[in-house]
Image: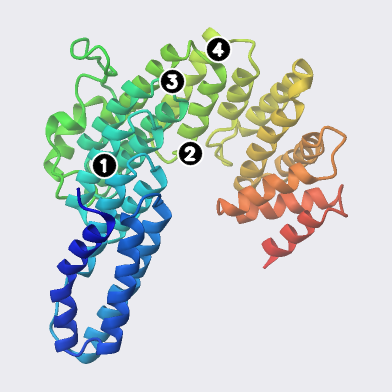
């Protein structure tokens, strides 16, 4: 068996020809070539010795990245023609590292990140196949792979396949179910967006069907999906014009697939109300889609039927009353009144949940206030009064504004600057000494 020195020598000899070529073309000087060779020798002896660690490989890879970056700059400045093997060397090191430390997820993630930035799509397919095979019970792997295929390659077929296979191994992972439903909702948005650009009418009168055959471990999706019309994967967002016209009578635009995922998740988790609320929150983020009100109503109907007295059911009812409110709608005053009465009674029925319930109310009222900016002044006053009430309730009468400041920072990071500004201004009225609120107010004012 070859010892560490023999292995090191073997790998070093493979790079000797390239180093000589770099010197011959005067990309690097003789002194620089000697320095590179010495550093490589040191690294090779370290990683081939017993007791080496993933960090040793990462330091070696970082060194090679720096060498490759410098080589590219020199080539550009000197105007010489030389392709070299810089990227191949880095990939080769990543392969060696992941073979030796196949259980190190951090190493795999860095490998994936490097390949994504390098746009090495074919190589990424192989990487995801390998890491999913080695770590099938890690939800993050399946989610990362699925998002990669839908975002980068616009390949819903592969993305859906990764999610389906991931759920076989991670069926008790809530995040897997949520991310799968989110993936399918994003795809609905892509299809709807392309149809809108093309000016195609959308037929929403069809009712979704279900596929009762197939693998019992797979989620039963609607009978007709975008997959069935074979959308072209060469388009930027994965949908071609012919497919869009064929989709006019398919249930995909009605949100049937996300609903199928939701129903399957509820069966898996015995109708857990908290998970249903998470689905509601996720779906509500796609408020611009025409099918979302129907999806949200389905989630709410499920909660009201299976957990009528749960606090999550009341929260979803409250949010549904105010979802996509139109300031010009004459019924908005009645909807706001009903919503505020509902959240008030919910606080009384669940006193131990007052802080979390109040936070939901504050989030919804902040969003509503933005919509009412140019509307009825009486409605603005009512929403502001309710906002002040539930901002105070968030601290449950004992805090110093920290919970309000935390929510404000979160809203700011989410890009909701106006909402964060209003919240900080409201909070300062009650907790003027809170430094975080003061800083938040100053940041949102600029």
| Contact between labelled residues 4 and 1, with CB atoms less than 8 Å apart | no
Please identify the quarter of the rendering in which residue 78 is found.
bottom left
- Label 1 vs 4, first from the N-terminus: 1
Indicate left or right for 323 with 335 as reference: left
* Residue picked out by circle 3: 172
Residue 349 vs residue 166, the one in the foreground: 166
Q: CA distance from mark 2 to mark 1?
A: 29 Å
Quarter of the image with the C terminus is bottom right
Q: Secondary structure at mark 3?
A: loop
Task: Give coordinates of residue 243: x percent, y percent.
Answer: 14, 38
Residue 244 vs residue 396, the one in the foreground: 396
Q: CA distance from mark 1 to mark 4?
A: 41 Å
| Contact between labelled residues 1 and 2, with CB atoms less than 8 Å apart | no
Q: Secondary structure at mark 2?
A: loop
Residue at 59%, 27% in the rendered image:
321
Q: CA distance from mark 4 to mark 3?
A: 24 Å
Q: Secondary structure at mark 1?
A: helix
Q: CA distance from mark 1 to mark 3?
A: 22 Å
Q: CA distance from mark 2 to mark 3?
A: 24 Å
- Label 2 vs 3, first from the N-terminus: 3
* Residue picked out by circle 2: 285
Indicate left or right for 251 with 403 as reference: left
Front of the two marks 1 and 4: 1
* Residue picked out by circle 4: 304
Indicate left or right for 146 with 343 as reference: left
Q: Is residue 103 above or below residue 72?
A: above
Front of the two marks 2 and 1: 1
- Label 1 vs 3, first from the N-terminus: 1
Q: Secondary structure at mark 4?
A: helix
* Residue picked out by circle 1: 128
Task: Give coordinates of residue 332: x percent, y percent.
Answer: 61, 33
């Amino acid at each position: 068996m070859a010892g560490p020195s023999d292995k090191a020598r073997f790998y070093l000899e493979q790079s000797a020809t390239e180093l000589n070529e770099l010197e011959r073309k005067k990309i690097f000087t003789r002194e620089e070539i000697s320095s590179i060779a010495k550093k490589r020798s040191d690294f090779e002896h370290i990683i081939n010795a017993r007791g080496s660690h993933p960090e040793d490989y990462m330091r070696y890879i970082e060194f090679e990245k720096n060498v490759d970056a410098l080589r590219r700059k020199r080539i550009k400045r000197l105007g010489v023609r030389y392709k070299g093997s810089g990227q191949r060397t880095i990939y080769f090191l990543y392969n060696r590292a992941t073979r030796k430390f196949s259980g190190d997820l951090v190493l795999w993630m860095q490998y994936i990140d490097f390949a994504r930035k390098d746009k090495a799509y074919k190589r990424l397919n192989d990487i995801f196949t390998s890491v999913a095979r080695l770590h099938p019970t890690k939800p993050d792997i399946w989610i990362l792979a699925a998002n990669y295929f839908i975002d980068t390659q616009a390949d819903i077929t592969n993305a859906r396949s990764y999610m389906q296979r991931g759920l076989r191994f991670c069926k008790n992972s809530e995040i897997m179910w949520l991310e799968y439903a989110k993936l399918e909702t994003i795809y609905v948005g892509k299809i709807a967006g392309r149809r809108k650009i093309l000016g195609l009418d959308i037929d929403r009168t069809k009712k979704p069907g279900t596929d009762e055959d197939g693998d019992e471990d797979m989620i039963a999706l609607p009978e007709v999906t975008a997959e069935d019309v074979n959308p072209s994967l060469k388009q930027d967002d994965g949908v071609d014009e012919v497919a869009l016209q064929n989709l006019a009578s398919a249930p995909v635009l009605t949100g049937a697939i996300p609903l199928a995922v939701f129903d399957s998740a509820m069966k898996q988790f015995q109708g857990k109300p908290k998970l249903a609320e998470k689905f509601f929150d996720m779906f509500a983020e796609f408020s611009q889609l025409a099918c979302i009100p129907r999806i949200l109503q389905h989630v709410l109907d499920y909660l009201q039927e299976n957990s009528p007295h749960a606090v999550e059911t009341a929260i979803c009812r409250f949010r549904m009353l105010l979802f996509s409110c139109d300031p010009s709608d004459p019924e908005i005053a009645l909807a706001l009144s009903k919503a505020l009465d509902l959240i008030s009674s919910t606080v009384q029925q669940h006193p131990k949940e007052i802080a979390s319930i109040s936070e939901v109310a504050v989030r919804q009222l902040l969003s509503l206030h933005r919509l009412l900016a140019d509307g009825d002044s009486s409605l603005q006053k009512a929403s502001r009064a309710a906002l002040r009430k539930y901002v105070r309730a968030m601290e449950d009468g004992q805090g110093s504004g920290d919970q309000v400041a935390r929510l404000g920072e979160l809203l700011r990071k989410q890009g909701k600057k106006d909402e964060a500004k209003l919240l900080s201004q409201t909070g300062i009225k009650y907790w003027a000494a809170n430094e975080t609120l003061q800083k938040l107010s100053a940041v949102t004012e600029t």
